[in-house]
Every structure is written in structure tokens, then in C-alpha cells.
Image: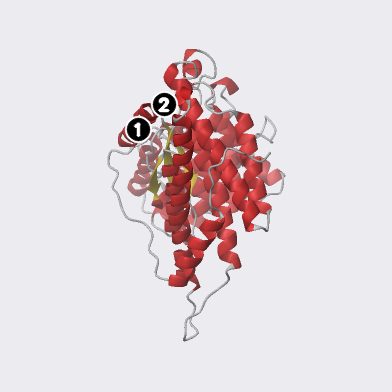
Amino acid sequence: MGKANRQRRRMKEKARKRASTTHADDVQWVLGGPPSLEDRVALEVSAALHALDHDDRPAFEAAAARVAERPGIAGWARVAERALASYLQAALRELWRRGWQPADMVRVVGRQLSARHVRLSCDAIAAELQSYAAATIDPRWAAQLAELEVQVWWRADQTYLRAWVEAQYAEWAAVVACALEVFDLVAALPELQMLGPIPGRARTTGSAARRRGPAVDERVLSRVRAMLAKAESTTFPAEAETFTAAAQALMARHSIDLALLAATGTGPADEPTGRRLGIDNPYEGPKVMLLGAVAEANRCRTVWSRQLGFCTAVGFAADLDAVEILFTSLLLQATTAMTLAGSRTDAYGRSRTRSFRQSFLTAYASRIGERLTEATGAQTAQAASEPAGRNLLPVLAIRDKAVEDAVAVMFPQMTSSVLGSATDREGWISGRNAADLAALHTGRELPE
């Protein structure tokens, strides 16, 4: 059990033992003299958490109001402000030690709470990470922070909680309630697989960085993104097919070239790692199938954490980049095609739109998997026939084994299950047809 969880449980236990009422003024302190202001704030915080734990909304709102303000007690709001900020930052530090990353935490907050809680979470992350030197924050974290627009925007003499009030984002009582709800959620999150160094331990220079090396050529990624952007924006299926096919072919060949360089010692060494990708409702199952199909075709594996709303893709860095980029684009193309197909009703006028769309996405994932695998196989066969690729197949077999071993280490308790069921024939056929329109050829001629 993490430190934050233990602290939270101890706080709640104190609240239960000290008084039958949650009012701090009624607590009888037997030892150590009268309670400090910090202790009294902590007791009210524990009462609020206790109420949340028991789904007692009126009790939570009353306790949160007492945390926010105690008329007649000088300095109460200031102490509460500092205490809440401290609790949140301590919970975040423990969360990083339990394998979570900023994007993971914000994703779960967004799924379970509200947009306001997400904004406050981002500010809490910014406050926690500002104490670390940039060189000790993993590049993957830095990319997530940039995407989330996490930054310190408040003055040095205030906390982000008080800054929210001064910026008129919310009244102080609402800020307190929001902070308590975020802390309650964060402190109860389970342990995850560690996918990289936590803040303060990353090293972007030195032998470790040289050993990992830059696994992906950003110029290749830029070309791939440009191709997929054109595929997503065109209204002509044949044109979308050409650009999507070119992107897959380019990433497949790039991955093969990197594997050969790593095997001969002329390129940066690499080892499998993991990357978490969000999977949102509705139709989570077919979306997971689509991600799995893209991952398999790019020599990666996926594990679904359904309750937390994400999949972990495991593989080598270049392959993970291909998976993330292609999955995002193909999901957008599939969703667009599914939406254009419209709603459906049965012979009695009852809606069958959900079963149609479920079947549509399931069929799309199945067919895309076939086409991606064909494309990767063609690129592999072509590279293996070249003089530089005579050792390609054993190299790829070794890398496949490394990925399987990494999955076994990261997820020792993993169980397998069959995903995807199609109950609507029309949806299945429509999904297969949509996937065929995104079919991937294997030619070497790539559009600029």
C-alpha cells in the first residue's frame, strides 16, 4: 500500500476514533495540549474524505465548507490553503512512485470527475514538478506536460489554489471541494507498471542516454503525420487509402532499418518499453481490438486496463510510435465512416444503431488487422531479399521474443480474453468495406 493511501486511511481512522461528531471544536485532546491549527484543518480534511469514502454528499459538503472557512479563527483559510496544496503534491509524488505518469492521472480524473478537476490536477502537477531540474524529467514526461499545457502561471508568493480564486476561476469553497475530490481519487489509485524514470531520476545525458539513443527519426514521424493528416481530411476514399498506405509502409521500413542497425551495433541500442494509450467509451471493446490489430502488425503487444480507461502497448520505441500514430488516425477514419453510415432501426422501428456500430467497428478492426499484417509482411520480405537484410528474420525473431518477455515481466498476473462480437450483419459488412477503403498497399513509391 502506498504512503498516500496509508496516510489517508490513518487520517480517517483518527476522525472515527476522536469524536462521534466531525467538528474539530468538539474533539477532546487528551495529550499534548490544545490542537494546532494544522491539526484542526487535518481533522476536517479527514472528515471530508471519510464522507466521500461513504458516498455521503451532504456530509462531504459540510466538511469541505469547514475546511474552507472557520469564521472567527484567524489564519484558518491560509493554513487550509497550504495544507491542501501540500497534501495534493505529496499524493502526486507517491503516484509517480507507483508507476503513474501525468497523462494517466489526468485521463482518470477526466473520466471520473469533471473538466474543472482536470484543470486543477494539471496545476497540481505543475506545482509538484517545478522543483525538479528539466534535465531530470524524462522526455516522454516533458512531451505529456506540453500536450496537457501544464505550466506554472501563478505568482511565486501564492499557491495555485488561491490563484484560482483571484483569477475568478471559482469561489474559495468550490476550490476546496474540488481539491479534496482530486486528492481522494488520486490517493486511492492502484499501482501501475513503471514505464520510465520518475522526476528527479531521469538522465538525458550520459551513458544511459547514449545506450538508449534516439530511437526514431523525427523527420520520418513528420512525414507520417503529414500523410495521415491528408488521409483524415480528404473526402475521397481512394486518396485516403494512398496516404494511409504510404504512412504504414514508411513506418514499417523505418522499424526494419532500425532493427538491423541495432543488431549490427552501428545504431543505438534499444529495448522494449511500454506506452499507455487512452481508450474511451463508447464501444471500448472494438477500439481495443483496433489498437491490438495495429500493435500486432507493428510487432507490439497490448494489455487492456479496462477500469482505468487505457491500454498499455509494449514494444520497441519506433514500433510504439507507429502504433500510436496509426491507431489515432485509423480510429478517426473509422469513426467518421461509422457516423456517415447513420443510424439504424429494425423491422419494428426499434433502434439497432448501437449493435450496428459495435459490429461496424469490430469488423473494421478485424479487416484493418489483416491488411496491416499483409503490408508489414510485404515490407519485411522485401527488406530480407536485399543484401543488407540477410540476417533480418533472426533479428526480428529475437526482438519479438524480447517484447514477449517484457510483457511477462510487466504483467505477471495478466489474463487473456476474447474481445469483440458482431451481432449486426449489416454493421459487419459495412465495417469490412470501410476497412478495405483504408487498405494498405506495399509499394515503395511514397507520396511527398
Quarter of the image for the C terminus: give it: top right
Residue 23 showing in the rendered view: no
Quarter of the image for the N terminus: give it: top left
Residue 400: x %, y % from top left: 36, 33
Compared to residue 215, the image places residue 413 above or below, namely below
Q: Is residue 190 left or right of residue 221?
A: left
Residue at horizontal 71%, vertical 44%?
A: 166
Asked where in the image residue 391 lies, by quadrant, the reply is top left
Asked where in the image residue 218 lies, by quadrant, the reply is top right
Residue 393 showing in the rendered view: yes
Residue that protrudes farthest toward the top in the picture: 207
Q: Is residue 393 left or right of residue 140?
A: left
Instruction: Please tell me which of labels 2 and 1 falls first in the chain.
Output: 2
Compared to residue 69, the image places residue 207 above or below, namely above
Residue 255: x %, y % from top left: 49, 32
Residue 357: x %, y % from top left: 49, 66
Compared to residue 283, the image places residue 39 above or below, namely above
Q: Amino acid at mark 1?
A: Ala
Q: Whole-Å distance between the Cαs marked 2 and 1?
A: 9 Å
Residue that protrudes farthest toward the bottom in the picture: 348
CB under 8 Å between callouts 2 and 1?
yes
Label 2 belongs to which residue? 271
Label 2's element?
A: loop
Label 1 belongs to which residue? 406
